[in-house]
Amino acid sequence: MKKLEGKVAVITGGNSGIGLATAQRFVSEGAYVFITGRRQSEVDAAVKQIGKDVTGVQGDVSKLADLDRLYADVKRQKGHVNILFANAGLGEFAPLEAITESHFDKTFSVNVKGLLFTVQKALPLFRNGGSIILNASTAAFKAAGGSSVYGATKAAVRSFARSWTVELNRSSRSRRSLYPPYQWNVWEVLTKLQKSSHSSRQMIAVLSPVSNCS
Ligand SMILES: NC(=O)c1ccc[n+]([C@@H]2O[C@H](COP(=O)([O-])OP(=O)(O)OC[C@H]3O[C@@H](n4cnc5c(N)ncnc54)[C@H](OP(=O)(O)O)[C@@H]3O)[C@@H](O)[C@H]2O)c1
């Protein structure tokens, strides 16, 4: 039996890069995946590339109505979620003196607000445990020219992971039927993705403390 046989995964930003590679790997491990992205043409192309056990749902994670539509689709088709990879994100760079309100709003809207509601709105679809994986970055704690806004969004993601681990574990003890125990088992999932990939190694380095941060 394959590792993810029978599992349902949602991967935001699944039409390119890390998200697409993850979707391909999950399907090869036996999962059914839902992928998202803002560009319908790229979502369609990714669905074709993945080939089977995949549904593409066009949507923008920073728009709450799009997230509602995504999870309504997941619920209608599969009824539940086992794995959520909140991966959609963007990185546009600007040095301090060149940061604009629009750069700030756009980056926080997708990387922080979008990620938060991606997770929050998925919670009712989890049952009997599951995995929630947040895509952060070494930019959360490493300085690089022009990356202050992007890095701040990724630091927020790391902070979310710490707080939510505490909240969801507490919920799972007190309200098991509503919030089953979530695992932030980054190693289990990510080490299987792209062992040789630089990006994947970066994510593992960033996210691995999450599993014991509570
Ligand atoms: N590449 C790296 O070295 C690296 C390192 C650390 C962390 N990360 C993080 O990894 C994640 C994926 O990055 P990547 O390198 O794979 O980049 P990528 O190839 O550009 O992929 C980004 C994905 O997110 C989607 N996306 C962007 N904004 C979205 C939105 N508002 N709503 C829904 N989907 C959206 C894009 O599709 P559409 O454009 O069609 O929406 C695309 O599928 C990001 O969170 C990034 O910060 C990357």
Image: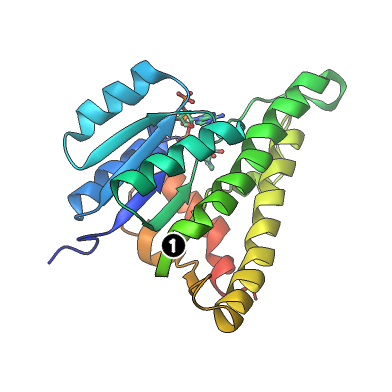
Q: Quadrant of residue 53?
A: top left
Q: Residue at x 69, y 26 (%)?
A: 106
- Could you classify mark 1 by the number of other residues whose Cα lies within 10 Å: few (under 14), some (14-19), or many (20 or more)? many
The answer to whether residue 130 shows anywhere in this view is no
Q: Identify whether 8 is placed above or below 198.
A: below
Q: Residue furthest front?
A: 76
**Side of 11 where 156 appears, left or right:** right
Residue 120 horizontal/vertical position (percent): 59, 53
Query: Which color mode does the image show?
Result: rainbow
Return the x and y of residue 3 as percentages of the image width and height: 22, 64
Give the residue number, with chain letter if any, for mark 1: 126
Q: Determine the residue positioned at 77% across, 28% down.
A: 104
Q: Residue 206: horizontal and vertical position, in percent?
A: 57, 56
Give the image quarter of residue 36: top left
Amino acid type at circle 1 is: Phe
Q: Nearer the viewer, residue 9 or 154?
A: 9
Report which quarter residue 113 is drawn in.
top right
- Provide residue 177's location: percent of width, then percent of height: 49, 75
Does residue 176 lie above or below 26 as drawn? below
Q: Quadrant of the N terminus?
A: bottom left
